[in-house]
Image (spheres, coloured by chain):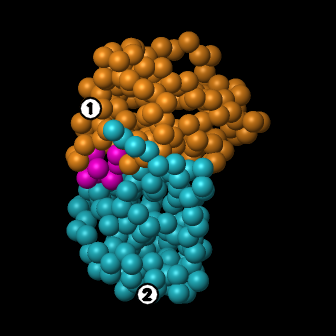
Chain colours: A cyan, B orange
Amino acid sequence: MTLAEVKDLLEAKVVVGDDKLDTKIHTAFGADLMSDVLAFARAGCLLITGLSNLQAIRTAYALDIAAIVVCRGKPLTDKFVEIAGELGIPILWTPLIMFEVCGRLYREGMTGCIREIRIEDKRSVSQE
Amino acid sequence: MSPRNEYDSYLQGSYEVHGRDFVDAGLVSSQIKKGLKAKGIDEDIIRRVAVLTFEAEVNIISYADHGTVSYYVLPDSIIIEAIDTGPGIEDIDLAMQEGYSTADDSIREMGFGAGMGLANIKKSSDILDLTSEPGRGTCVKCTIMLNGKVPNGE
């Protein structure tokens, strides 16, 4: 799927990256927690998040993520747009909720960049 | 604990990180990544360095007053050192467990504090050497082996 197709499917606005709409994307990762993105997302995937701070962009840059979809219509600051442009991370913005975004993409054949967390990663920890 | 430079590196950098400076979290990671990309280092290696430095930076910002994140490119490896003057880690084994976190709400609001940091640092390193003195600080030293993936033209 191209980023242009993702944009149409999600009724999204291209905030950054008009020149990268032909980028091909096959996998995605959805989370608001950048700790989990840093631990589990993969290079080249689409990041779907409701976190619209600079850390979302810097996380995407660290991992070579192809583009970010900011969902739930979260407001974007000028600084967010500026840093995304500077680091070359395309930003799509949509009022759709994360569930709707994931559902539409999945229906069209996009898959998760990983399917599940491996069993040995699932230890539960008692904090007290 | 203070930074040291005992490595025979041909490329290096050191960045200061201030505690509670959440707005800039990830900035050092981005700067180091840009620098390494310009030197033509393998992109898989750079990605691991960027993830490691990001996690180390967030740890310093979240828990310490002050710290430094440094990288050293050696002929066969890249070393990342994150040294802080924080409270230290009482129980390193517990802190290494995924999901264990002492983060407060201000950290979680920024999208961090899930208790994945140290485990992810370990996963992204070939060698991890973590030392901590409660009440004084923590030193995280990570080594990534280049395995022949030497930079272009170096």
Q: In the depicted view, which residue is nearer to us: B75 or A50?
A: A50
Q: Say the numbered circle drawn on residue B46.
A: none
Taking B53 as reference, is B110 above or below it?
A: below
Badge 2: chain ID: A
Q: What is the magenta range?
A: B107-113
Q: Mark 1 points at which residue?
A: B19
Residue at x 71%, y 28% (from the top left corner): B76
Asked whether A110 or B79 is in front, the reply is A110
Describe residue B60's horizontal placement relative to residue B76 as left or right. left
- Dot 1 amino acid type: Gly
The answer to whether marks 1 and 2 mark residues whose Cβ atoms lie closer than 8 Å is: no
Chain at tag 1 = B
Residue B64 placement (x, y as % from top left) = 30, 28
Which type of secondary structure does the marked residue at label 2 adopt?
helix
Q: In this view, does B147 lie to the left or right of A10?
A: right
Q: In which quarter of the image is residue B41?
A: top right
Q: Does the magenta stretch include residue B132?
A: no
Q: Residue B107 placed where, x, y %?
A: 28, 45
Dot 2: few (<14), some (14–19), or many (≥20) neighbours within 10 Å? few
The disc labelled 2 sits on which kind of residue? Asp
Q: Which residue is drawn at 38% across and 25% down?
A: B89
- Outermost residue toward the right in this view: B148
Nearer to me, A33 or B40: A33
Which residue does the numbered mark 2 point to in the structure image?
Answer: A8
Task: Please indicate, yes or no, whether residue B28 appears anywhere in the rendered image.
Answer: no
